[in-house]
C-alpha cells in the first residue's frame, strides 16, 4: 500500500511541475542573406524577458550588435547571448527575432 501511495504522489508531484506547450506549426522563409519573411514557430507561451546587459567593445567598421534573445528548442526556450556580426553585404540591416501573436519569428538580414 505504501509503495502504491508513493508512486501516486510521485506522479502527482511531477505533473505539478510540468509546463505544457503545444506546437502548432512551423513556417520558413529566407535564412541568411535572403530578403524573405522570417521563419516562425507557434507556441502557447511567450519566452521569458530578455536579459539586459551592455555590449562588449565595438570590434570595428562593418559590424552590427545582435542583441541576445530567447529561441525555441523543443518545448522550452533557450537563451542566445548577444554577439557582434559582420554585415553580409554593404547596407545590410539586422531584423531581430521576435515573439508576436503567439508566434516566434527568427531574425534575418535585409536590404
Image: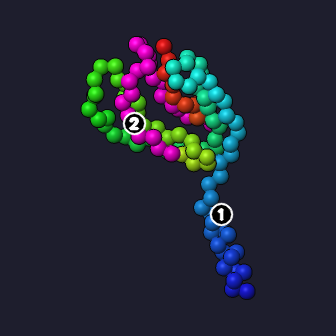
The residue identified by callout 2 is: 82
Residue range (magenta): 78-103
Magenta stretch: includes residue 95: yes
Q: Is residue 71 left or right of residue 27?
A: left
Q: Which residue is mark 1?
A: 15
Q: Earlier along the polypeptide chain: callout 2 or callout 1?
A: 1
| Residue at the image point whose x is 66% and y is 79% from the top | 6
Disc 2 and disc 1 in contact, CB within 8 angstroms? no
Indicate which disc residue 57 carries: none
Q: In the picture, which quadrant includes the N terminus? A: bottom right
User: Please, is residue 21 above or below residue 31 in the view?
Assistant: below
User: Picture coordinates of residue 33 (x, y %)?
Assistant: 51, 20
Q: Position of residue 23 (x, y in %)?
A: 68, 42
Q: In the picture, residue 63 is in which quadrant?
A: top left
Q: What residue is at 40 percent from the left and 21 percent from the top?
A: 87
Q: Residues within 10 Å of mark 1 (few under 14, many from 20)?
A: few
Q: Mark 2 Cα within 10 Å, few/some/many (few <14, many 20+)?
A: some
Magenta run includes residue 15: no
Vertical placement of residue 23 versus 96, above or below = below
At mark 2, the secondary structure is loop
Per the image, label 1 sits on a secondary structure element best described as helix
Residue nearest the viewer, comparing 51 with 55: 55
Residue drawn 66% across the image and 30% down it: 27
In the depicted view, which residue is nearer to us: 42 or 110?
110
Q: Residue furthest bottom?
A: 1
Residue 106 visible in the snapshot: yes
* Figure quadrant of residue 11: bottom right
Asked if residue 10 is positioned above or below residue 81 in the image, the reply reads below
The image shows residue 74 at horizontal and vertical percentages of: 61, 46
Amino acid at each position: 500500500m505504501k509503495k502504491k501511495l508513493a508512486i501516486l504522489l510521485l506522479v502527482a508531484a511531477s505533473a505539478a511541475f510540468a509546463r505544457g506547450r503545444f506546437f502548432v506549426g512551423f513556417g520558413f522563409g529566407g535564412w541568411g542573406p535572403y530578403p524573405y519573411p522570417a521563419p516562425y514557430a507557434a507556441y502557447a507561451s511567450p519566452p521569458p524577458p530578455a536579459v539586459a546587459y551592455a555590449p562588449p567593445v565595438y570590434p570595428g567598421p562593418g559590424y552590427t550588435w545582435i542583441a541576445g534573445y530567447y529561441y525555441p528548442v523543443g518545448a522550452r526556450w533557450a537563451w542566445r547571448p548577444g554577439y557582434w556580426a559582420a554585415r553580409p553585404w554593404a547596407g545590410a540591416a539586422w531584423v531581430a527575432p521576435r515573439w508576436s501573436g503567439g508566434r516566434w519569428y527568427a531574425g534575418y538580414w535585409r536590404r
